[in-house]
């Protein structure tokens, strides 16, 4: 039962992508009309769902292969298939280590390998939004989500994204990646948003709606303010 709940929660997490009224994650080019997808099962439990997509390696090579889509982020390696299953049986599975991957696009979802100058993170995170600050998330597949109430006006646009105390957040601004740690979040995030003093003050003072679990709303507010100011 525990395994079923974990996989069910992960499936719910990646079911849809939100819209925050700004530039969304770049949709994948539909390489072919694939509306079915293929389940890969393990010990009788659905472990992921694969669709045709593009996997880009760090050397610039692009591969048109069947890629996983179920989870909000992947770690260590990406498994993929070159051909769909035959008579219900999967053909040879391939693996590509995350540190050899640059990105993948599949079914409108964009994942990018997190780059950090001081850490070899080996995580491919789901890109939630683009803008002056791009936001990415990753949730460990073994974690059980405990959804956080988002309040009026936020639940609907965030439907399907597991905003909980299990999310790991990554931001990118001007090409520089930053991992947003839960530890000392108000101070660290306020400093990161110092060019938006009003927003930084809300975060620094831990006002309701400006906490670690509110990262999508915080980044959306920042991007909207900067876009509106032409910057």
Image (spheres, rainbow, N blue to C red):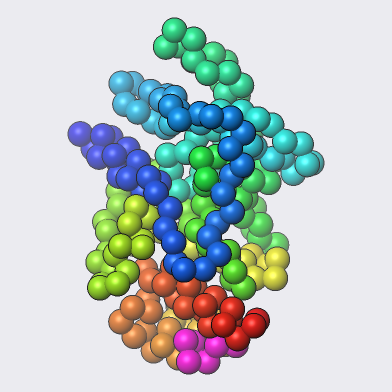
Tell me residue 41's x, y (percent).
Answer: 38, 23
Nearest the eye: 126 or 54? 54
Which quadrant does the C terminus fall into?
bottom right
Q: Which residues are magenta?
A: 195-200
In the figure, residue 30 lies in which quadrant?
top right
Q: Residue at x 42, y 11 (%)?
A: 88
> Can residue 216 be found in the magenta stretch?
no
Q: Identify whether 67 is placed above or below 136.
A: above
Q: Is residue 77 visible?
A: no
Q: Main secondary structure of the magenta part?
A: helix
Q: Identify whether 24 is placed above or below 220.
A: above
Q: Identify whether 153 is placed above or below 79.
A: below
Tell me residue 85's x, y (percent).
Answer: 49, 15
Q: Residue at x 25, y 66 (%)?
A: 149
Left or right, residue 114 beside residue 202: right
Which quadrant does the N terminus fall into?
top left
Nearest the eye: 173 or 152? 152
Left or right, residue 83 beside residue 5: right
Residue at the extreme top: 87
Residue at the extreme left: 1
Tell me residue 36's x, y (percent).
Answer: 43, 27
Q: Residue at x 65, y 30 (%)?
A: 64
Tell me residue 79's x, y (percent).
Answer: 55, 30
Q: Residue at x 66, y 57 (%)?
A: 115
Q: Is residue 138 visible?
A: yes
């Amino acid at each position: 039962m525990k395994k079923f709940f974990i996989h069910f929660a992960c499936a719910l997490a990646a079911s849809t992508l939100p819209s925050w009224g700004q530039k969304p994650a770049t949709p994948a080019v539909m390489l072919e009309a694939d509306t079915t997808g293929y389940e890969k099962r393990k010990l009788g439990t659905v472990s992921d769902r694969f669709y045709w997509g593009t996997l880009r390696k760090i050397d610039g090579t692009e591969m048109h292969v069947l890629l996983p889509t179920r989870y909000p982020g992947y770690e260590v390696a990406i498994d993929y298939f070159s051909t769909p299953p035959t008579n219900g049986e999967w053909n040879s599975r391939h693996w590509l280590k995350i540190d050899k991957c640059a990105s993948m696009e599949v079914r409108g979802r964009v994942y990018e390998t997190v780059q950090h100058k001081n850490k070899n993170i080996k995580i491919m995170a789901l890109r939630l939004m683009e803008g002056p600050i791009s936001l990415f998330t990753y949730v460990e597949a073994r974690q059980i989500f405990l959804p956080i109430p988002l309040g009026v006006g936020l639940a609907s646009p965030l439907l399907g994204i597991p905003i909980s105390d299990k999310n790991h957040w990554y931001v990118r601004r001007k090409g520089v990646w930053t991992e947003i740690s839960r530890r000392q979040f108000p101070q660290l995030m306020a400093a990161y948003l110092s060019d938006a003093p009003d927003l930084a003050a809300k975060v620094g003072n831990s006002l309701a709606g400006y906490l670690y679990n509110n990262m999508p709303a915080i980044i959306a507010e920042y991007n909207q303010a900067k876009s509106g100011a032409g910057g």
